[in-house]
Image (spheres, helix red, strand yellow):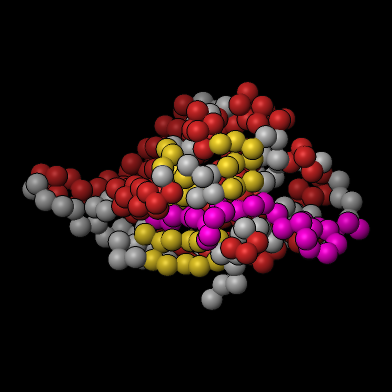
Amino acid sequence: MYETLTWDVDADGIATLTLHRPDALNAFNLTMARELEQVFLTDARDDAVRAVVVTGSGRAFCAGMDLSADGNVFGLDESLSPTPDEFRASYDQAPYDSGIRDTGGKVTLAIHALPKPVIAAINGPAVGIGATMTLAMDIRLASEKARIGFVFGRLGIVPEACSTWFLPRIVGIQQALEWVYSADILTAEQALAGRLVRSVHAPEDLLPAAYDLARSFVVDRSPVALGLAKRLIYRNAAAAEPLEAHLTDSLAMYWASVGDGKEGVAAFLEKRAPRFTGKASEIPAIE
């Protein structure tokens, strides 16, 4: 189905998305960019999918952009020179959509918009886009063999894939700047100390730990409540004042209480497992 990825969904609705260019250390190319965006905008939005675990095939997670491509390796049109105002007004239209927009950013925006848990199981080297794509995932677990690098300064380019929004929110501005300035390769233990990853595991324990975590999120949980909670936390962490959180919290609580919340309360009172019927594809608007 895909050239650069594999996709599998188990009986609990846990999907495994594997970056699959092992001979190239799963290096990111324009085909992988298109396929990743498609997965998160289509396959992962199927209501049968409850959570997504992302990992790499072979010994790497993703070795960054494939720099062996002809021409502009990032797929950008070097004949264009838009002003910021021109680009902002027409960024999703030709020629800017394909000629200027960062392909990694399209991927991370699709990941971020998915109303379901997304867990990165970083099994080996993850540098450049291999590191920044994980920032849009909700939680990162790393193998002891993981090596993570925001190495853009070594190539004379800048952090991409919306990472200047995600990284400071995860690790703080000071740590984000140090890692970007230095362009060093971090060990799994350094990433853990900097709070980039949740936990470090022996290689053989990494995927089982990610699957256990994913199941703890979705089994006997409401997909609607989960999706709303994800949206609220990301949105309101950047809100200007708590009133913004109050307004969206209130709408989310209202819709949850008249939906799966009724079943959740009944199950609690009757001391049984809940039977939620809400669907992630039917999450109501709250803003």
Q: Position of residue 234 (x, y in %)?
A: 49, 39
On screen, 2 above or below 124?
A: below
Seen at 70% across and 40% down, the residue is 151
Dominant secondary structure, magenta:
loop
> Is residue 59 rendered magenta in the image?
yes
Q: Position of residue 251 (x, y in %)?
A: 39, 42
Most extreme residue toward the left is: 270
Seen at 65% across and 31% down, the residue is 179
Seen at 52% across and 37% down, the residue is 188
Q: How many numbered badges does the structure rendering display?
A: 0
On screen, 50 above or below 177?
A: below
Is 249 on the left or on the right of 79, as rendered?
Answer: left
Q: Which residues are magenta?
A: 51-79
Q: Position of residue 7 (x, y in %)?
A: 47, 67
> Is residue 73 rendered magenta in the image?
yes
Q: Can residue 262 be seen? A: no
Camera-side residue of 249 and 231: 231
Q: Can residue 7 be seen? A: yes
Camera-side residue of 158 and 238: 158
Seen at 41% across and 42% down, the residue is 201
Q: Position of residue 80 (x, y in %)?
A: 89, 56
